[in-house]
Image (cartoon, helix red, strand yellow):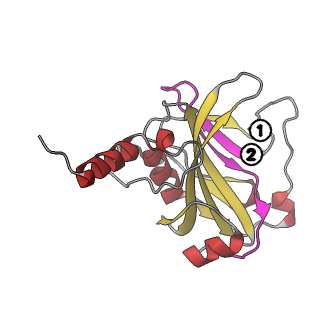
Amino acid sequence: MRISIRSIAFASLAVCALFFSGCSGGSGKVAPAGGSSSIKAGTPAAYEHGVTFAAPEGWEAAGRQGKIIVKFDNPKLDGQSVFVRNPEAAEIKTLATEEDAKTAGLEGTFMQIGDYGWVVKTQRSRDPKTEDVFDNLNCTTVQFGKAFTVTIRGYKGQNEDAEGVMNAVLGAIQFTEATQESAEVKIDENTEFNLDF
């Protein structure tokens, strides 16, 4: 039986599409496929920094923790969560094109999801305290001169349907320009959530 190089390449791409977190070697550029995921966004709520966010239906709020605006956990899969990091100053006002992404120094694949342009990339990380390894799908947009990153995280090899979660939450998220008063938040100092890995 003869197998062509084209068949092997196609099979490799198909496997990567199904298990994108493991194909990047930890920091690859991936454009997850849309697909017909059953994940739906729940009820949106307003948070700090002008973010209106809706987690996947049935996910449980974990509140505001340290360096993030809001975090939700998947009660059906230990270790899987979605969270929005505190915004950082950006080199551009709005991310709308691939050229904007280059100007802003954002690495990954540019995608239009919902009302906004996003740069999407996978990354593998390790928690230095527990040695747990995670697969992360990081999605960054720039609005009003600030870079916002939404991360879908799960234990290595267990970040199930991360692209479905991505499409649901990014399709529903909204940003408004935050005033100085609304941007000032009180962080719960008793809660630890390490994002530095």
**Neighbour class for label 2 at 10 Å: few (<14), some, many (≥20)?**
many
Residue 97 visible here: no
Q: Amino acid at mark 1?
A: Gln
Residue 15 shown left or right of residue 93 in the figure: left
Q: Are marks 1 and 2 in contact (CB under 8 Å)?
A: yes
Q: Residue at x 42, y 40 (%)?
A: 19
Instruction: Give the x, y percent position of residue 72.
Output: 61, 38
Residue 123 location, quadrant: top right
Instruction: Give the x, y percent position of residue 128.
Output: 76, 28
- Quadrant, the N terminus: top left
Q: Amino acid at mark 2?
A: Ile
Q: Residue furthest left?
A: 1
**Stretch in magenta:** 68-94
Task: Give the structural element (helix, strand or loop) at label 1.
Answer: loop
| Residue that carries the numbered disc 2 in the rendered image | 68
Q: Residue at x 77, y 24 (%)?
A: 129
| Residue that carries the numbered disc 1 in the rendered image | 65
The front one of 155 and 50 is 155
Whether residue 193 appears in magenta in the rendering, the answer is no
Q: Residue furthest front?
A: 2
Residue 7 visible here: yes
Instruction: Give the x, y percent position of residue 26.
Output: 59, 42
Tag shown at residue 190: none
Task: Give the structural element (helix, strand or loop) at label 2.
Answer: strand
Q: Is residue 49 above or below residue 135?
A: below
Q: Is residue 179 above or below residue 32?
A: below
C-alpha gap between disc 1 and disc 2 = 6 Å
Q: Residue at x 33, y 51 (%)?
A: 35
Instruction: Give the x, y percent position of residue 138.
Output: 60, 50
Q: Is residue 107 above or below residue 193?
A: below
Residue 139 location, quadrant: bottom right
Residue 13 shown left or right of residue 147 in the figure: left
